[in-house]
Image: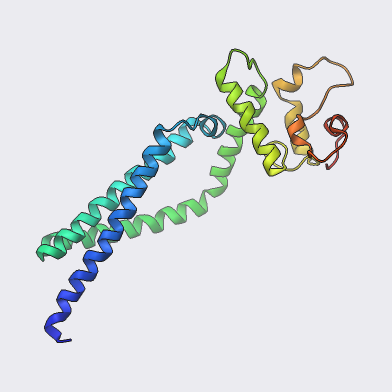
């Protein structure tokens, strides 16, 4: 290959790379739009609508930036426009810097995000689980998703297993627990906290121990 042919090869490589980037951007936009408009009510209810909506919008915005970047890269390469390629590389650099900053911030504030998510999940568990299921669709969805999570993940509450004091304490502060008759036969956790293989689920729900 001659030296003169190298720029053409570089141009085609850059075009091919940006076609892939364009596809990634379109997929991101589609995924963000789907999560924003799809019927994912259960997930929204248990994690908090603001967190859910914010994540969806972030994905869409990121996808749009990627698409614009890909068009600049392809157009600049095909037309051999120094202006477009200059803008492309500047945006690429800024995007890389933003990615690094976002990664660092995500690492620094991961505990805060986890805490906020846990608080929202605790709020739904305490205030909505098994509350007015006949008249409240949101509460029915929250109840169903909590039962699914606890059954499939073999956990109990927001943190810990059935044997966790934290789980038991949280359930005993819930509206579901307070709605039970005030006597010694109260069940302390829902049936979904207990292993399906147990022969005595009622005992599991009343005795604090790992099951």
Q: Is residue 81 visible?
A: no
Q: Position of residue 183 (x, y in %)?
A: 87, 17
Residue nearest the viewer, comparing 4 with 121:
4
Residue at image position (41%, 39%) is 56
Q: In which quarter of the image is the C terminus?
A: top right
Asked whether, in this view, residue 109 is left or right of residue 31, the answer is right
Vertical order, 100 against 169 (above or below): below
Residue at image position (27%, 64%) is 17
Vertical order, 72 against 162 (above or below): below
Asked whether, in this view, residue 163 is left or right of residue 74, the answer is right
Residue at image position (18%, 86%) is 1
| Picture quadrant where residue 199 is located | top right
Q: Position of residue 169 (x, y in %)?
A: 77, 32
Q: Is residue 203 visible?
A: yes
Vertical order, 47 against 132 (above or below): below
Pick out the residue farthest to the top. 135
């Amino acid at each position: 290959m001659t030296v003169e042919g190298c720029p053409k090869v570089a141009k085609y490589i850059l075009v091919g790379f940006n076609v892939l980037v364009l596809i990634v951007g379109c997929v991101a936009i589609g995924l963000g739009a789907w999560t924003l408009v799809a019927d994912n009510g259960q997930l929204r209810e248990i994690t908090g609508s603001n967190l859910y909506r914010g994540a969806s919008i972030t994905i869409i915005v990121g996808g749009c930036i990627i698409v614009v970047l890909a068009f600049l890269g392809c157009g600049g390469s095909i037309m051999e426009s120094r202006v477009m390629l200059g803008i492309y590389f500047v945006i690429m650099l800024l995007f890389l810097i933003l990615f690094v900053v976002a990664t660092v911030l995500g690492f620094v504030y991961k505990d805060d995000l986890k805490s906020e998510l846990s608080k929202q999940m605790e709020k739904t568990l305490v205030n909505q689980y098994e509350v007015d299921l006949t008249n409240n669709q949101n509460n029915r969805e929250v109840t169903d998703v909590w039962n699914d999570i606890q059954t499939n993940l073999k956990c109990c509450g927001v943190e810990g297993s059935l044997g966790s004091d934290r789980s038991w304490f949280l359930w005993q502060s819930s509206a579901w627990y307070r709605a039970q008759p005030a006597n010694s036969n109260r069940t302390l956790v829902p049936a979904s906290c207990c292993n399906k293989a147990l022969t005595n689920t009622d005992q599991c729900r009343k005795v604090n121990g790992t099951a």
